[in-house]
Image (spheres, rainbow, N blue to C red):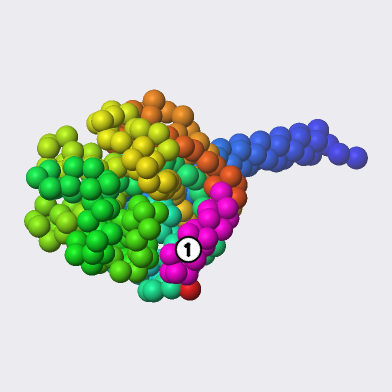
Amino acid sequence: MFSIKKISAVMCAGALALSLGACSSKETASSGSSKKEAGPSYPRKAISVVAPSGAGGGWDLTARSFTKVLSETKLVSQPLTVENKPGGGGAVFMAEYATQQAANNEMLFVNSPPIIINNLKKEGNSPYGYKNTTPLAQLTKDFGAIVVKKDSKFTDLKSLLDEVKKDPSKLTFAGGSAPGSMDHLISILPAFKYGVDPTKIKYVSYDGGGEAITALLGGNADVIGTDASSVKEFLKAGKVRVLAVTAADRLGGDFKDVPTAKEQGVDAEFTIWRGVFGPEKMSKEAKSYWEITIDKLVKSPEWKTEVETQGWELEYKNSADFTKFLGEQEKQVQQLLEALGMQK
């Protein structure tokens, strides 16, 4: 039989065990709580958003607007930086990204039709395209613009194209992307639609829209084909004249007095979408994070104001819709390049 002292000792031991168990449970709960408070494992590092061009062009402006509003709205708590990686109208960066950064969740980039065009064109083509990425979202759309200096003798698209028709190699066209890429297509599309052999047009490429505009203003080019938004400030400052935009209808704001190519009897339409991409082997967690974050971004008043300020049009497609759209765009670009004799 147990004595009173033994029973008392057993009871004390049991109480101590219960007490220790309770403490252990509290510690476990506390530990779980701290893990929960730590939040998701992505992102834990600074995020870089690459513009695969020099400063001043559409990719650069898009990357800077994207990072600026994400930071201002505190949708992303980690630092966001923009990197310019020019070369080959985006092809040089694509080669590095697809082969060396395929699993780098902390590096995103912006692009537009060149990611498709560079992969399909014959000259200087890239073996890498959107299928070597994780498309995250389409953010905006813009349109092509045919631009000359303010004091140019050309006052409308027809007068320019008539000159080109007489001698296709007389004038120098320039753009911020490689031959066969987006700016090149914008430059020669109206002439092609006007019955000019596009292969005879002299085209000079620069690394980014900013450099192309500098070439125009410096007298090293007669005409540039570029995105409308990148010449907005030069138009406002009275430094350039925009002869036509490649939209279906006239644009508003600073471009309200600029006629479309179609208005001038030239059926040349070209939409420049812009989107954000991640690496091909992006983790599910990172992809999900950006899908949710970008969805919040495009719905924010700050983003809508930024898009309007830049002269873009908001056109959002989520990851799934954007990927489907890129497949459709690929077919259209292939047809255009075939018509121009530029397909690989």
Is residue 252 shown in magenta? no
Tell which of 315 and 63 is nearer to you.
315
Up/down of 318 relative to 305, above or below: below
Instruction: Decide if residue 86 is on the left or right side of residue 194.
Output: left
Residue furthest to the top: 301
- Whether residue 84 is visible to the viewer of this picture, yes or no, is no
Which secondary structure type mostly characterizes the magenta part of the structure? helix
Please report the residue visible at 43 percent of the width from the left and 69 percent of the height from the top. 342
In the rendered image, which quarter is residue 189 located in? bottom left
How would you rate the neighbour count of disc 1 (Cα within 10 Å): few for under 14, some for 14-19, many for 20 or more?
A: few
Name the residue tied to disc 1. Answer: 339
Tell which of 156 and 94 is nearer to you.
156
Q: What's the magenta region?
A: 325-343
**Local secondary structure at mark 1:** helix
- Whether residue 153 is visible to the viewer of this picture, yes or no, is yes
Residue 215 at x, y = what percent? Answer: 14, 58
Residue 315 at x, y = what percent? Answer: 46, 37
Please report the residue visible at 47 percent of the width from the left and 44 percent of the height from the top. 138
Locate the N terminus and report the quarter of the image it occupies.
Answer: top right
Residue 111 at x, y = what percent? Answer: 40, 54
Please report the residue visible at 12 percent of the width from the left and 48 percent of the height from the top. 152
Amino acid type at circle 1 is Ala
Is residue 337 shown in magenta? yes
Up/down of 341 relative to 110, above or below: below
